[in-house]
Image (tube, coloured by chain):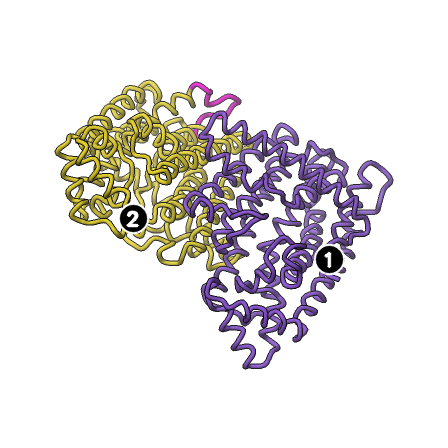
Chain colours: A yellow, B purple
Amino acid sequence: MAHDERLVARVLADARDLVRGEIAELVLRRRATGYGPLYDLVADYPLREGKGLRPAICLSAAIAAGGRTEQALGSATALELLHNGFLVHDDIEDASTFRRGRATLFADRGVPVAINVGDATNILSVGVLLENVSTVGVRKALLVLREFERMARESVEGQAIELDWIAAGTFDLEDRDYVRMVYKKTCWYTVIAPLRIGVICGSPPGEGRPTEDELLDLVALGFHAGVAFQITDDVLNLVADEGAYGKESAGDLWEGKRTVMLLHFLRTVGAADRERALRLLTVARPDKDAGEVAWLAAAMEREGSIDHGRALAQRYSRKALELESRVLGPSRDDDSADYRHFLREMLHYVIDRTL
Amino acid sequence: MAHDERLVARVLADARDLVRGEIAELVLRRRATGYGPLYDLVADYPLREGKGLRPAICLSAAIAAGGRTEQALGSATALELLHNGFLVHDDIEDASTFRRGRATLFADRGVPVAINVGDATNILSVGVLLENVSTVGVRKALLVLREFERMARESVEGQAIELDWIAAGTFDLEDRDYVRMVYKKTCWYTVIAPLRIGVICGSPPGEGRPTEDELLDLVALGFHAGVAFQITDDVLNLVADEGAYGKESAGDLWEGKRTVMLLHFLRTVGAADRERALRLLTVARPDKDAGEVAWLAAAMEREGSIDHGRALAQRYSRKALELESRVLGPSRDDDSADYRHFLREMLHYVIDRTL
């Protein structure tokens, strides 16, 4: 559990509520002037209960940098929209049928509609970013757009790396291959960009604020925290109960997803078990045998692959914590203290989940 | 044939070459720093031979407004990229297996890769638009971004309307339903936005140039020209030979696409033939009978539905021509005369194709 669980829960809930309100209002506006049924579908994923992690990081970073919530609210909303647009497309790409307790959009409405809704969601996020001009001025609005472009580019590159592994049936991968993929696919849009965008929106006015160095430090911090976050998510997917975690148990094994744990297992296990695992992994999901999936989960545990994942996540978490005090600056006793504290607690939250 | 066929061909070819050069350079740059294999696929569609219509309209509008090619080249490149990103997604949504003489991307590489490549192409276009700041300044760069957001939004709304017709099996539609869908899905990104963005980039510096009224006139002009263009395309799809037109003959009937001709036929034909047509249209493409497709094409001709389409296209073309002299201003004897002339010829080109 996080050291200050209540603070983390409150900041997440506040950010989620604020951003959901923005999205609901935006969808109403678009419905009024555009083709309504499209926007009902655009609103579907964002209004299902998500963690609100990205908006919370963005808003907290803005306040920790000395700014106000209003300055970063548009950007936080756009982050949440883009995240959901990606999820709609990801669910098709991964053939996922289940998202936040309900059928995925493509499973419900078909692939064509889902592709178009994902595109519409991404376009909506650009619309929100263009409105930033009135809250943070032209210069920062353009800086934030650049961050979004970079973040989205890293995400599709990370996705391309993973899709190419799948298409080629590649399983001979080192931890560093995985880490590079996750740096692009997850870290940028889950941690790095929310941090950088929050700091850009919240930092005091004036050319050159924040500095290039400050923004680079946030890449390093977000990278380490993001890798820890993703590995932890993958560990939980393997070991958590269906009920407690909200996703199906060992869904990643059914999907054949390359995780550090699976890659470790395939590198270290004997030839016979390796062959048995690969036979399972390369079979299409509906044809997979539940007994074999259970065998693989247990074999990975025995082989020390789960522990390998936990240890790697902790290594990245600790490095993130080291960076954190330098990058986010010393604690101050002002209005921003809570949000600075939240950002720290988020790192602890990631670590503690791995234990 | 257009009145000045050589001019049209030259302006199209010049625009195509310029933009292809930009895209090739951009892809090289992204390859150098990002995940290379993704950008090979991003370059695939843009480097297949397209008409180059959108860049040609954009560049010509910039020069007709008194500007230079360099001021609009980034925007024209972004238009072409976004067009191709949409095509990659459209091909999945329409289950099209054939594009510019080769297999569509999803048919070749699968749906997951194609969705991601479409997203990457769209993101690349945003990157190009952000570089506009250095060529047209901050104010115009933001105006152009707003145009892109509007254009993309109209496109996905038009696509949503059409996808909803397909999902619900709706064929009871009036010309005005079709026109509204095409206004959103085709006119905005094929004519309206290229015109407006070209004029924004090429107009003399100064706040409030071009004026809101000038930009609104371009919506009317682009709407009429765009509807004429799309209906003409649909007529050619029905009547052209396979070889001459470059697409399969009557592909729209195989696809069950709602065109003004088909909708007219279903509104006017007797009950028995209507039932026979609907049976064919609601059957999945691979199960369609070639004899029935040929019957429908001939019946539509007999029923006067092709003539109805031609007449409607001509009505929109003539209205566009009326608007054109008022909106684009009188001919002047300067460097921009050729490009002004090109924009006029494009309208004639659309009309003449329908005859």
Q: Is residue B181 above or below residue A67?
A: below
**In the image, residue A203 lies in the stretch drawn in magenta:** yes
Position of B287 with respect to B269 (left or right) is left
The residue positioned farthest toward the right in the image shown: B333
Residue at screen point 71% across, 53% down: B221
Q: Quadrant of residue A72?
A: top left
Residue A283 seen in the figure: yes
Q: Residue furthest left?
A: A302
**What's the CA distance linking mark 2 and mark 1?**
49 Å
Vertical arrangement, residue A313 with respect to residue B146, above or below: above
x then y, percent, for residue B219? 67, 52
SS class of the residue under badge 2?
Answer: loop
* Extreme residue in the bottom direction: B271
Q: Which residue is mark 1?
A: B353
Comparing A3 with B2, the one in front is B2
* Residue B80 occupies quadrant: top right
Q: Residue at x 25, y 51 (%)?
A: A287
> In the structure shown, which secondary structural element does the residue marked by tag 1 occupy?
helix
Q: Position of residue A19 (x, y in %)?
A: 39, 44
Residue shown at 43% from the left, 57% from the top: A40
Q: What is the span of residues highlighted in magenta in the rendered image? A: A202-213
Mark sitting on residue A284: 2
Q: Quadrant of residue A339?
A: top left
Q: What is the crowding at mark 1: few (fewer than 14 residues within 10 Å), some, or many (at least 20)?
A: some
- Report whether B168 appears left or right of B184: left
Q: Which mark is residue A259?
A: none
Q: Amino acid at mark 2?
A: Ala
Residue visible at 54% across and 50% down in the picture: B153
